[in-house]
Amino acid sequence: EVQLGESGGGLVQPGRSLRLSCTASGFSLGDYAVGWVRQAPGKGLEWVGFIRSLVYGGTTEYAASVRGRFIISRDDSKSIAYLQMNSLRTEDTAVYYCTRDRGPILTAYYPDNWGQGALVTVSS
Amino acid sequence: SYELTQPPSVSVSPGQTANITCSGDDLEDKFASWYQQKPGQSPILVIYQDTMRPSGIPERFSGSNSGNTATLTISGTQAMDEADYYCHAWDNSTAGVFGGGTKLTVL
């Protein structure tokens, strides 16, 4: 069974950093891209970013709202992906989901499995 | 940046057909996927690559994508289908994009 589990969420002050981990089981993480999607309280889904599999260069893409502040990385030997969040703002408060992403189909990707989410609260 | 637009809400009677739309420039040239999210739960994939249904998703869920609009159709809607639905597409300039979501109410 495909499973994704996020950890590392919590309360953090504005301007500080936090790192989320996404642990995969039931499949080989190295064969897939991994994405991060967030959902602010009572709001819709917002795509945050993703990292391609190493076969496709392990390169990353980010939403404009987090580019330059967030960094996605992966350690396939441990079946873990990371979301390093720096210079956090109150508007970054959300549940953060990691996703297994299928693709590329031509150049496109889409999430096909989701974790349970980790709540990150940015507040003083 | 690329944007996807969904109606905030759709209502349907039990047993009837619900159509949820997702609009974006030249959306037919991209692959649309759809996600169902019930309160307090993580989203699940119900349609991918415009029309494909993952294993375990009921046949009453179907999808189409033409022109600037992708549509999720739920035939014979059941009370258990009441949820928020989100479309997703990949744009080579913006990367991943979600629509704003549609709340489906089964009256």
Image (cartoon, grey):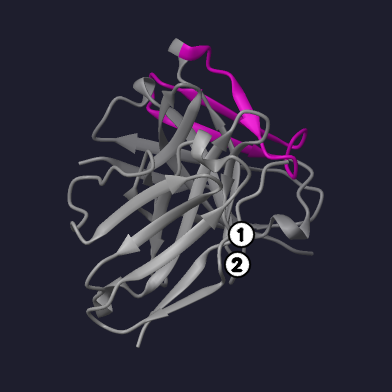
Task: Using residue B98 as the reference point, say whether residue A4 is left or right of it.
Answer: left
Q: Disc 1: which chain?
A: A
* Residue beneath disc 1: A94
Does residue A105 lie above or below A11 as drawn?
A: above
Q: Disc 2: which chain?
A: A
Residue at screen point 20% across, 41% down: A1
Q: Quadrant of residue A121?
A: bottom right
Task: Using residue A121 as the reference point, say whether residue B35 is left or right of it.
Answer: left
Q: Earlier in the sequence, mark 1 or mark 2?
A: 2
Magenta-drawn segment: A56-85
> Of all residues shown, which one is farthest toward the bottom?
B107
Task: Using residue A91 as the reference point, say whether residue A4 is left or right of it.
Answer: left
* Residue beneath disc 2: A43
Secondary structure at numbered mark 1: strand
Check if residue B3 falls in the magenta segment: no
Numbered label tally: 2
Residue A17 vs residue B20, the one in the foreground: B20
Tags 1 and 2 touching, CB below 8 Å: yes
Q: Amino acid at mark 2?
A: Lys
Q: Amino acid at mark 1?
A: Ala
Does residue B84 lie above or below A48 as drawn?
A: below
Mark 1 surroundings within 10 Å by alpha-carbon count, few (fewer than 14), some (14 through 19), many (20 or more): many
Mark 2 surroundings within 10 Å by alpha-carbon count, few (fewer than 14), some (14 through 19), many (20 or more): few
> Gap between marks 1 and 2, in whole Å?
9 Å
Check if residue A84 falls in the magenta segment: yes
Secondary structure at numbered mark 2: loop
